[in-house]
Image: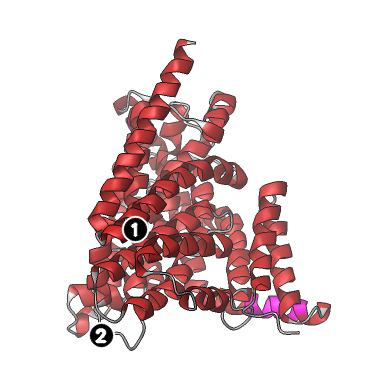
Amino acid sequence: MDLTSTVWTLLPPVIAIALALITKEVYSSLLIGILSGALLFTGFNPLHAVETTFEVMGSKLGDNIEICIFLVLLGILVSLVTKSGASRAYGNWAVKTIRTRRGAAFATSFLGVFIFVDDYFNCLTVGTVMRPVTDKYRITRAKLAYIIDATAAPVCIIAPISSWAAAVGSSLPESSSMDGFSLFLQTIPMNLYALLTLVFLMWLMAADFDFGPMGKYELEHREDELSSVEENHVVGGAGKVYDLILPICVLIVLCISAMLYTGGILEGANIIDAFANCSSSTSLVLGSFFTLIFTFLLYIPRKILTFGQFCEAFTEGFKAMVPAIMILTLAWTLSGVCSEDYLNIGGYVSSIVSGDSMVSVLMPAIFFLISLGLAFATGTSWGTFGILIPIAVAVFGDAPSTMLVMTVAACLSGAVCGDHISPISDTTILASAGAQCNHMDHVSTQMPYALLVAVFCFIGFLVGGFCGNGFVALVVGVILLFCAILVISAQQKKRAQN
């Protein structure tokens, strides 16, 4: 019995997510979800299912090996900066400069916005740099993870110069005559989830309070979470603040330069085409590798670290990234089992969407919900808009109309939202790793915030679809968000008075 491209294909991610939420054990939950998908694909043949599992795992690791290499190189860089004492120096400087919890939270978010090139780089770097400062002002690891996550994908998806812009531009059908980068630029002011999430985050930090599971977690853990920024590294270097700032700046510049290089800038491509055609994973590896060389030249001649200490950072950095790589490997494998070559979740979703005769005015809101659900179930936003954007083009035609742009923006919004709340999402995993927060604590405290914003996005896309105007969708979403902020603030003041 062939169960591919049917409703049963949704079972593996549902099992993995449900088990992760219930047991708070991500590794076993993902593995059980993968095996259940392999069993469905193989007609419940256990031996063939195990064989299929490792076949998919090997394939996905091969396809994503450069991301793993980048994580290892970045882990080494983080270890070097920590061993040099530069992180400690920056923390001491920041503690003297930043006087309040609000200041620490805003500094963290601004650094997250500044590192807009790639969400992986963002999650790990911001957490490492700001953790000692947020610890000093009793910002819990769960709150830090939320700030990191809310300024990672939501910023990258509205940043023209980022790996995400290239991914969106390359998601158009091969037969399309539209310019993918131009279409991406038009979606930016209509990307409700990204914009509203940033507004919501700014308010949370300015008001300096939390509610729901995050508020409860803050009350329970604010006083007992102490800084572990030194981790297992020996910190004895005499590094200065610029020994932290310079490697980060060089990494950003080199990653952007590598994107232009891999995109063909030397062969005559213009900047927009170079970013659209670049290999982001290769670029990140090149940028991080040459940053390590720069860091060697910055530290060793000045005796910030000895050669032996520099080499020790290689194994320490690798070990620090093992948990993230393990979870990513399992998440990629689950995504592979659900892919077109196996269970084909995308084909099932496509058949539902394309076979429905709903009026076009509902499409932005419908695509937002489907994109959110698909990204949540698979843990991948890139895969989600890669599936849905071609369907949107098929529905509205190969011309950049307002409804097409709004629907594509809805796909991107839903994909980022689903990715944001999914426990098997790579960015969610890396935000937890960057903040050194228990992964399921991050998921459970972040989800209500993300879903609150998602409700206003859905209503905004619904109204915008009927009006045929994406800016109306944004205005409606912003107004509803501010109304919610006023209500929550009033309730908070009432509780404080009581």
The Cα atoms of the two marked residues, 2 and 1, are separated by: 25 Å
Residue drawn at x 31%, y 74% is: 169
Colour mapping: secondary structure
| In the foreground, 498 or 127 | 498
Q: Nearer the viewer, mark 2 or mark 1?
A: 2
Task: Assess whether residue 51 is covered by the magenta stretch.
Answer: yes
Q: Secondary structure at mark 1?
A: helix
Quarter of the picture containing the N terminus is bottom right
Q: Secondary structure at mark 2?
A: loop
498 shown above or below 74: above
Question: Between residues 369 and 253, which one lies in front from this camera angle?
Answer: 369
Q: Is residue 408 left or right of residue 220?
A: left
Residue 371 x %, y %: 47, 64
User: Which label belongs to residue 468?
Assistant: none
Q: Is residue 163 visible?
A: no
The residue type indicated by label 1 comes to Cys
Q: Residue at x 76, y 78 (%)?
A: 49
Q: How many marks?
A: 2
**Residue bounds of the magenta highlight:** 49-56
**What is the number of the mark on residue 177?**
2
Q: Is residue 440 magenta?
A: no
In which quarter of the view is residue 6 placed?
A: bottom right
Task: From the image, give the main secondary structure of the stretch colored magenta.
Answer: helix
Pointer 1: what residue?
Answer: 156
In the rendered structure, the answer to whether residue 120 lies left or right of residue 194 reads right
Q: Residues within 10 Å of mark 1 (few under 14, many from 20)?
A: many
Residue drawn at point x = 48 percent, y = 53 percent:
420
- Can you give x and y, in whole percent of width and height, for residue 124 in the image? 45, 51
Q: Is residue 195 above or below residue 15?
A: above
